[in-house]
Image (spheres, rainbow, N blue to C red):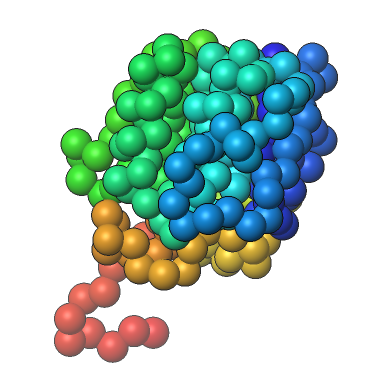
């Protein structure tokens, strides 16, 4: 698969580095940095897109400017791409209204577009854009699904020693695009089942996650916190059978 990643800073560069280091060897990943300065209103997006860009099947948009999404239909036209993943880890870069417009613009030229919010909510069949159930959007595209098999919503395969209740291994089934899940997996080995969920959250923050720390209106929470919960939920479900449950009887002094 030929991938063109649009980046404008450290956020996107870290994603690209992780994809190149851990993605399938048959993938090729090229990058394009759009102009650093874009006008508040872009009347002619084609003026900001080169006439020649690397041919691509899938575009990954990791731009850190709200003008960049407006360029994506022309980028798809020039590259011949048939699918787009436009990350929303900060709504200042891709507001919800513009995300809806972008999906429509690309649909009009028969290009599938997903706008996962946060980026690590992407799976092979759906992605999230908010807290409510109806804000999970399903999609059907083989290119995006192939990408999401390797990068998206974190999925670890954890092994716990039933006697010691310590994590003996944590295999990365699907990494976060930024590499956070792989980092967390390494840090979880040797951790008690009792502490694993909390430790996963700490590792997520220490990586660190680069999702927004501002309160997002669609979640009523920060995207960094939502992202961390996706990893914690995956770990928590697997260690739950090995956790020691303590019962507290009211009015009884503990030994």
Residue 43 versus residue 251 in the image, above or below: above
Q: Residue at x 63, y 40 (%)?
A: 48
Q: Residue at x 67, y 61 (%)?
A: 207
Decide if residue 228 is on the left or right side of residue 55: left
Q: Position of residue 132 (x, y in %)?
A: 20, 45
Q: Position of residue 77 (x, y in %)?
A: 57, 19
Q: Nearer the viewer, residue 174 or 130?
A: 130
Q: Residue at x 57, y 32 (%)?
A: 46
Q: Residue at x 30, y 30 (%)?
A: 137
Q: Nearer the viewer, residue 41 or 112?
A: 41
Decide if residue 105 is on the left or right side of residue 34: left
Residue 226 versus residue 45 in the image, above or below: below
In this orientation, does residue 110 appear? yes
Residue 48 versus residue 14 in the image, above or below: above
Q: Nearer the viewer, residue 173 or 3?
A: 3
Q: Position of residue 113 (x, y in %)?
A: 44, 26
Q: Quadrant of residue 102?
A: top left
Q: Quadrant of residue 53?
A: top right
Q: Position of residue 64 (x, y in %)?
A: 58, 54
> Which image quarter is the N terminus in?
top right
> Which image quarter is the C terminus in?
bottom left
In this orientation, does residue 157 appear? no
Q: How many marks?
A: 0
């Amino acid at each position: 698969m030929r991938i063109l990643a649009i980046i404008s800073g450290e956020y996107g560069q870290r994603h690209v580095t992780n994809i190149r280091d851990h993605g399938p060897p048959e993938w090729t990943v090229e990058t394009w940095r759009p102009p650093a300065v874009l006008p508040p209103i872009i009347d002619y997006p084609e003026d900001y897109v080169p006439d020649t860009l690397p041919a691509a099947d899938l575009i990954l948009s990791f731009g850190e400017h709200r003008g960049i999404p407006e360029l994506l239909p022309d980028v798809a036209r020039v590259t011949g791409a048939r699918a787009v993943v436009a990350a929303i880890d900060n709504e200042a870069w891709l507001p919800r209204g513009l995300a809806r417009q972008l999906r429509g613009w690309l649909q009009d030229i028969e290009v599938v577009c997903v706008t996962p919010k946060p980026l690590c909510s992407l799976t092979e069949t759906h992605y999230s854009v908010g807290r409510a159930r109806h804000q999970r959007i399903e999609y059907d595209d083989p290119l995006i699904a192939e990408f999401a098999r390797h990068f998206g919503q974190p999925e670890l395969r954890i092994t716990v020693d039933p006697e010691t209740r310590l994590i003996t291994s944590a295999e990365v089934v699907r990494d976060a695009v930024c590499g956070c899940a792989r980092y967390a997996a390494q840090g979880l080995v040797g951790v008690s089942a009792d502490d694993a969920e909390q430790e996963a959250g700490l590792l997520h923050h220490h990586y660190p996650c680069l999702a927004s720390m501002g309160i997002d209106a669609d979640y009523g929470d920060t995207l960094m916190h939502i992202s961390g919960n996706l990893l914690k939920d995956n770990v928590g479900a697997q260690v739950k059978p090995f956790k020691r449950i303590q019962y507290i009887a009211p009015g009884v002094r503990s030994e």
